[in-house]
Amino acid sequence: MHTDDEVACRSYTHARRYPWVIGRIGGWQLPTQLTLAQVAAMGAALGVLVATRALWAHLPRVANLAVEVTLPGLAAWSVRHVRMEGRSPLRAMAGMVSFLATPRLGRLHGRPYRDTPPVLVRNRIFVAGNGHVDRACHR
C-alpha cells in the first residue's frame, strides 16, 4: 500500500550497466562469460593469425598452437572493460556507422532533407516622386 506522499517506481539502471554476455553456445557451457566485444576480438585475432600464418608460424607445432590460443585470449582479455562514451566498442561502432550513414542535413519525415536550390530573383524598384528634396523641411 502506498500513501499519497509516496511514488511507486522501478529503476533498471543497475541491470543496464552490465553488458550483454554469452554464456552458452549450442548447449555447451563456456568456462567464462564473454561479451560480444570479446568474441569479436577473439575472432578478429584468430582470423589475422590464420591469414598471416606463413609469416610467423616457424616455431615448433606446440609453440604455434600456444600462439594461436594465447593471442586471441589476450585480445579478449584486453577488451573486457573497454568503454567509449560509456558504450561498448560494438555499440560505439554502430553509432559511428549510423552517424556516417545519416544525410548531412538530417532527415525530415523519414527522407533525407534537401535545401531548396537558390533561385535568381529579378526585381525592379520604382521610386515615385519628383526627384528633388524640399529644402524648406530640412532647416
Image: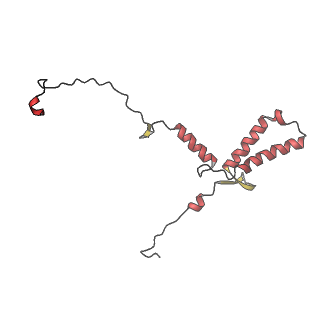
The reply, left or right, for residue 53 in relation to residue 78 is right
Residue 114 image point, x, y percent:
41, 33
- From this view, report whether residue 16 is shown above or below residue 79: below
Q: Which residue is drawn at 78% across and 38% down?
A: 49
Residue 115 image point, x, y percent:
39, 33
The reply, left or right, for residue 122 in relation to residue 7 is left
Q: Which residue is drawn at 60% across and 61% down?
A: 15
Count of marks, rendered view: 0
Find residue 40 and report its image quarter: top right
Q: In which quarter of the image is the C terminus?
A: top left
Q: Which of 133 and 20 is in front in this view?
A: 133
The image's colouring method is secondary structure
The reply, left or right, for residue 65 in relation to residue 10 is right
Residue lying farthest to the front in this orientation = 139
Q: Which residue is drawn at 43% across and 74% down?
A: 5
Residue 42 image point, x, y percent:
73, 45
Residue lying farthest to the right in this orientation = 60
Residue 41 image point, x, y percent:
71, 45
- From this view, report whether residue 113 is shown above or below residue 81: above
- From this view, report whether residue 40 is shown above or below residue 22: above
